[in-house]
Amino acid sequence: MTTDLKSPATPDAAWQDDVRAGVRHVRDLDRLPLSPAERAAAQAAATAHKVRAPKAYLDLIDWSDPNDPIRAQVIPSPDELVAAEGELDDPIGDHAFSPVPRLTHRHADRVLLFPTYQCAVYCRFCFRKESLTSIGRGYTREALGPALAYIADHAEIREVILTGGDPLSLPDKALEEIRARIEAIPHVRLLRIHTRVPVALPARITTGLVAVLQGRLMVTVVTHFNHPREITDDVERACRTMRQAGFVLLNQSVLLKGVNDQVEVLEELCRELMYRLGVKPYYLHHGDLARGMAHRRTTIAEGQALVAALRRRLSGICSPTYVIDLPDGGGKVPLAASHIEGCEAGTWRIRGQDGEAREYREVVG
Ligand SMILES: *Cc1c(COP(=O)(O)O)cnc(C)c1O
Ligand code: SF4
């Protein structure tokens, strides 16, 4: 590993080629090995949510398997056109807590900042897809002005979370400017970046990119891996580059039917994230109410059974917290079934990991 410390940055041209050779427009679907019927279906579905995927990500697809878990995440499916009752445009209530454009402030100490509404890959299950398609704006210095003034005016804000869109789809120069502007606000302590770039476009994680993010602030990169097959040598290199820059790496996954709703898949994903990439599994999100996604949602009971089995197999460090992001700004709350069965006169009945309940008598001084 020490020899890699000084390995040269992946040349910028590598990731740009990866973008160019990928799918950027609906017409690029023509180049994929789809049957005419599959292509027509994908083209129709792409009208509801943009289509985009770099070549590196498309290369992971096994085209002989119509249910391939990588394909399911990026190739539009006609099921997306089926709107189920109860689905929402803004499933986690971002807009209700947006005091100024491009900022969401729901928890006192942290804000979401949206420097761009573009992504390197458009995930079919995206919970912000309505914002991405209807707004579609990029970064300009002026666009973030009100949001940064708001952060400067609110001394309780400690963490600025760059999300979007995908912040790492921006050029280094823009990221450097954003980092410097946030860093200039003295009460901000931590810069968080929520991104799918390390998964979908790992060659984009260059030493030049990590250098522009380094400064006064603690940097945390929250990646978004959903399946163990997304973990490749290039991804490992990208994560090593970020760890060597001193960034704390966490991952959030979305529980998706037919992609990762099997305990073996989640177990391998969480182990490889931690043991191979040094990325701590942070959240496993229950599928939110994004439109046209009923076909990828599990029930909460299914999710609870999965995470109970997962917790028995994994160490604490490898275990994500299963959460739901409540509509109307209720925030993220844990969903795992409680181990507590009851309490009477200071004696609690608590189920152990083996499923057997035990009594725990409280002794306090
Ligand atoms: C998810 C989210 C955060 C970050 O929450 P953590 O639990 O700290 O990861 C902050 N603000 C909003 C509006 C969010 O949706
Ligand atoms: S990268 Fe994130 S914001 Fe962009 S489409 Fe995927 S889930 Fe949505």
Image (tube, rainbow, N blue to C red):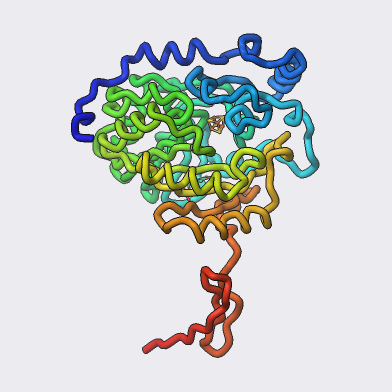
Residue nearest the viewer, comparing 349 with 138 = 349
Residue nearest the viewer, comparing 194 with 295 = 295
Quarter of the picture containing the N terminus is: top left
Note whether residue 279 is visible: yes
Vertical arrangement, residue 345 with respect to residue 290, above or below: below
Q: Residue at 62% x, 45% y: name it.
A: 261
**Residue 356 in the image, given as x and y percentages of width and height:** 57, 76
**Residue 112 in the image, given as x and y percentages of width and height:** 47, 40
Q: Residue at 42% x, 27% y: name it.
A: 168
Q: How many numbered marks, from 0 up?
A: 0
Note whether residue 153 is visible: no
* Left-right relation of 68 to 280: right
Residue nearest the viewer, comparing 234 with 111 = 234
Residue nearest the viewer, comparing 132 with 250 = 250
Q: Residue at 60% x, 30% y: name it.
A: 73
**Residue 354 in the image, given as x and y percentages of width and height:** 54, 70
Q: Residue at 56% x, 44% y: name it.
A: 97
Q: In the picture, residue 41 is in which quadrant? A: top right
* Left-right relation of 292 to 307: right
* Left-right relation of 191 to 21: left
Vertical arrangement, residue 182 with respect to residue 357, above or below: above
